[in-house]
Image (spheres, rainbow, N blue to C red):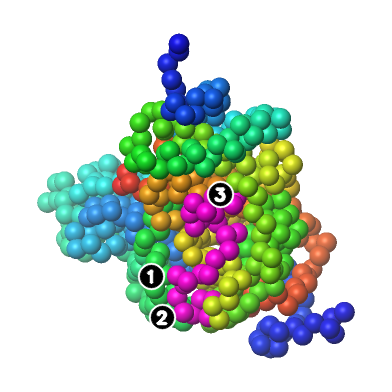
Amino acid sequence: MNKLADHVWARTYPNLGTDAVPVEPCISDEYFHREKERLFKRAWLKVGRIEEFAGPGSWKLKPMRIWDTSIILVRGNDDQIRGFHNTCSHRGNRVIWAEEGRGRSRNFFCHFHGWTYDMQGQLTDVPQEEEFLDSFKRCENGLTPVAVDVWEGFVFAHLDPLPRQSLVDFLGQAGARYSGFPFGEMTAVYSYRTVLNCNWKVAQDAFSEAYHVTTIHAGSFPDGFEAKLCDVELIGPHRCSGIRMTEQGPNPSPIAGLAHRLGSSSIAKPGMRTELPPMINPRRDPAFAFDLAVLFPNFLVHVMDGLYFTHQFEPIAVDKTLWEGIQCFRPPQNAGERFSQEYGQVLQRNAWLEDTATMEATHAALSSGAKKVMHLQDHEILIRHSYKAVEDYINS
Amino acid sequence: MSKRVLPEPFAQLECWVERWALDNQNARETVRRASSSKELQAFYDAMVGEMDGIISHLNNFPLDNMPPLQARLLYLTLSLAEVTPHVELYRGNSRVPYSFEEERFVADHGAVAHYLGNLYASA
């Protein structure tokens, strides 16, 4: 049977090889430690959207467990978004007393001894400053910065305040292919999260192929999607592909049909996909359903006409991952559009409940040592690429 | 005569208001999970044939400033969106078959009343 298939992706990307892939990187504490130090502390990571920072003084406190810190992201009076460790320069107290949150203020005030910082992270006030000794200079004791940059409205941060590669260079052609997609217009947000007791790659892999759709999504998407990828592009450590509908497409039920008529709000709605930038669905295939991209290391972007959604898999421990899935639409203009979005986002949530169903049991089974390798078929090429990209980055 | 709770043309749906006219997603999910297959089907059957008329009616009102009767009717349609996959796709199962524990999914928007997508509006 294998001889009949032409293994188009294995032929296109021969450097990835054809061997079974070891599962050790998903279950090894030592490997996780190397990922943390050599990958996540050396890569740009998505930390938010610009819409979260409405104006000067808007801030977000974000735990960055994989960096062993939490960061304050804040928009300054100059409109620039900056990032700082949430650590007072005096004796290390948390400046914002919370695990996470959002707010708007003129300055940050440490409640331990009253040290105060402005939105640029500069230390502006120290009570009884004259009592400090010569070794202390106020101008040298601002908050410790991290690098922050913005791509298509997504806010990214890098632990190194002066990273050797800019965000735009890091994303390269994988980022450039989205140029022109109206992310900034899709500000109606449905955001889900949970902590999964599995390795971050076990979770991410489940969203990196379409082979699973006919079985795991037999409930929510019982027909209409092809199990094969199209337009696969492996760009440095990043990976992109298209997902197609079958010739018949999904068979809409009465209410799904109504939701499709009232709005543009589901991956299961057929359409001409005319809004997409030229590098996405490059052949303008009318059966194109959505674009599936993994921006290295852990940020997935799916775009299609009228909506996009993202996933992020934030490692907490070798067997613990914070997953965040966010769906974004244009703000609804009337009740029909609101209903259409609700139907689309609820069905997508349910599909994510199906996706996440396997992960914890998979991780537990892999941890048993019963299987040393996983077998990947040709249309699981993105997963094959992922393990190599992680390994290469760790060793770079 | 008791006071109207839905717009006049949809008065026949008033018996569903107490259980299903819920202004936030968490509440709609909780009631859906607590409903039997028969209850989901009955609500779906009552709504499905009315949807074109309901949407035509509601589209005459501003989404961000709906009068109370219209807002209640909108919440019924959002409950229908919540219930529909269970009737049309999951054979009446009030949970998603072969799925992760739904209670562990946290919707950041889930508790917001009359949610229109503006999750970051408060910042």
| Helix, strand or loop for disc 2 | helix
Residue type at mark 3 is Leu
Q: Is residue A233 visible?
A: yes
Residue type at mark 1 is Trp
Which label sits on residue A151? 1
Prevailing SS of the magenta stretch: loop
Q: Residue A276 lies in magenta, yes or no?
A: yes
Q: Which contiguous range is marked in magenta?
A: A256-282
Task: Depth check: give the residue in front, A119 or A305.
Answer: A305
Q: Quick check: A361 left or right of A78?
A: right
Circle 2 residue: A169
Q: Chain of mark 1?
A: A
Query: Which quadrant of the view contains residue A225?
Result: bottom right
Q: Chain of mark 3?
A: A
Q: Quick check: A243 left or right of A300?
A: right
Q: Are marks 3 and 1 in contact (CB under 8 Å)?
A: no
Circle 3 residue: A258
**Residue A79 percent location from the top left of the image:** 23, 62
**Which marked residue is nearer to the observer: mark 1 or mark 2?**
1
Please identify the residue farthest to the right as the structure is shown.
Answer: A1
